[in-house]
């Protein structure tokens, strides 16, 4: 892709590293989040109650359309979504559920302002009060926005973040390098962040999923109603294997998920039950899981007119896989 600016050509390029992309985003923070935003390049661990740690790339306080705070995760599109990006976002959510973690974040963010009188004066002018600590404490008590800043947005990323709790926004940040010179002279293309008014709580409505209702009433996958916020999947366990019926916007699949120190060996044994000559699937690895995913249909929850077909295909395919495992010695 070429961008022409005043007759000068700029060529689309991939950032050399996450750090390069992160620096560009930080430098353009006011254009992404608004002119009154504050970017914090703070690499501090946030831990869940169970001690699971993660390190966000940064934090932002912004004021459009109302005061919000955001956790920033900078990624390159070349990184595997399910093995790298999604586990990070899940850890962020678990970490901020811990009140002690939020308290530490308040102290860290307040310390940044307390050490910089100019920065503190800017914030005081914006919030129309001198109670900086109270403002930060009240803000961090609300659910944050999670922002994934990435050099190229993909359908896989959009589908994957649909299962992440809370409000997640993707900022596609493209870099164009000026041609014909040795120095790095760049132009950037992105859409300024737009968020919904509100208090920053989980953006998904209360209630139960209409899609899963018939499936949960009877049959192999019978169970409790599925909350709307969790409607991306339902699961059933067998022999230490979690069989997950996955529902995306325009896609559905069956995922077999195994965990534990021997997860890869066990996954490989399971895979032998499904020869590639008869079954289509992909195997994946992550730090905690070994998985097999069987595509079912290129239709999903936004294809409402196909819901009966999707339900039938998901449950029948899931049942066949379940029975195959049940009858085996894995």
Image (cartoon, rainbow, N blue to C red):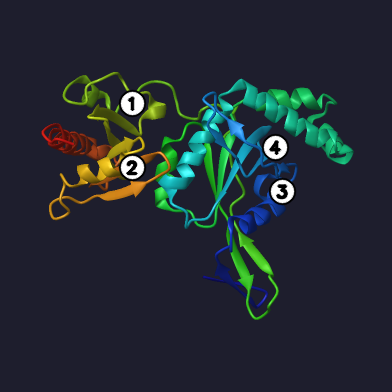
Label 2 to label 4, Cα distance in Å? 37 Å
Q: Earlier in the sequence, mark 2 or mark 4?
A: 4
Q: Is residue 69 visible?
A: yes
Label 1 to label 4, Cα distance in Å? 33 Å
Q: Earlier in the sequence, mark 1 or mark 3?
A: 3
Q: Estimate how packed mark 3 is, as few (under 14), some (14 to 19) or many (20 or more) residues with alpha carbons within 10 Å.
A: some
- Please state, as top left, top right, bottom left or bottom right, where the C terminus lies in the image: top left
Q: Estimate how packed mark 2 is, as few (under 14), some (14 to 19) or many (20 or more) residues with alpha carbons within 10 Å.
A: many
Q: Is residue 114 above or below residue 12?
A: above
Q: Estimate how packed mark 1 is, as few (under 14), some (14 to 19) or many (20 or more) residues with alpha carbons within 10 Å.
A: some
Q: Please name whichever residue, 303 or 324, is drawn nearer the observer in this view of the structure.
A: 324
Nearer to us of marks 1 and 2 is: 2
Instruction: Please provide percent x and percent y for residue 74.
Output: 58, 49
Instruction: Please provide percent x and percent y for residue 220.
Output: 17, 26
Q: Earlier in the sequence, mark 2 or mark 3?
A: 3
> Which residue is depicted at the point 17% across and 21% down?
218
Whether residues under marks 2 and 3 lie with C-beta atoms below 8 angstroms apart, the answer is: no
Identity of the residue furthest to the left in this view: 327
Q: Earlier in the sequence, mark 1 or mark 4?
A: 4
Label 2 to label 3, Cα distance in Å? 41 Å
Quadrant of the rendered image containing residue 319: top left
SS under mark 1 = loop
Nearer to us of marks 2 and 4 is: 2
236 horizontally vs 19: left or right = left
293 horizontally vs 126: left or right = left
> Which residue is depicted at the point 32% across and 39% down?
262
Label 4 to label 3, Cα distance in Å? 11 Å
Q: Which residue is mark 2?
A: 290
Label 1 to label 3, Cα distance in Å? 38 Å
Q: Which residue is mark 1?
A: 209
- Please tell me the numbered disc located at residue 30: 3
């Amino acid at each position: 892709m070429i961008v022409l600016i005043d007759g000068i050509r700029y060529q689309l390029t991939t950032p050399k590293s996450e750090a390069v992309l992160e620096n560009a985003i930080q430098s353009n923070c006011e254009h992404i989040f608004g002119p009154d935003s504050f970017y914090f390049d703070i690499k501090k661990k946030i831990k869940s109650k169970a001690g699971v740690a993660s390190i966000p790339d940064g934090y932002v306080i912004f004021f459009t359309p109302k005061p919000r705070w955001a956790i920033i995760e900078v990624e390159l599109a070349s990184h595997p979504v399910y093995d790298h990006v999604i586990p990070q976002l899940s850890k962020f959510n678990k970490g901020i559920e811990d009140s002690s973690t939020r308290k530490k974040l308040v102290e860290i963010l307040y310390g940044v302002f307390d050490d910089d009188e100019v920065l503190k004066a800017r914030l005081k002018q914006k919030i129309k009060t001198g109670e900086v600590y109270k403002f930060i404490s009240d803000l961090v008590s609300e659910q944050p926005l999670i922002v994934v800043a990435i050099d190229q947005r993909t359908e896989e990323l959009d589908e994957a973040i649909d299962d992440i709790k809370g409000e997640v926004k993707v900022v596609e940040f493209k870099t164009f390098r000026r041609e014909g010179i040795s120095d790095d002279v760049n132009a950037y293309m992105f859409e300024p962040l737009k968020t919904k008014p509100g208090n920053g709580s989980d953006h998904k409505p209360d209630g139960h999923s209409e899609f899963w209702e018939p499936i949960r009433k009877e049959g192999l996958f019978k169970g409790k109603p599925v909350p709307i916020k969790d409607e991306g999947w339902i699961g059933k366990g067998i022999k230490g294997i979690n069989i997950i019926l996955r529902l995306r916007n325009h896609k559905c699949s069956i995922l077999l998920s195994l965990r534990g120190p021997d997860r890869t060996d066990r996954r490989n044994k399971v895979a032998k039950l499904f020869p590639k000559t008869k079954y289509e699937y992909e195997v994946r690895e992550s730090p905690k899981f070994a998985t097999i995913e069987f595509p079912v249909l290129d239709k999903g929850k936004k294809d409402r007119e196909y819901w009966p077909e999707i339900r039938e295909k998901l449950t029948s395919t899931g049942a066949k896989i379940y029975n195959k495992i049940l009858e085996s010695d894995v």
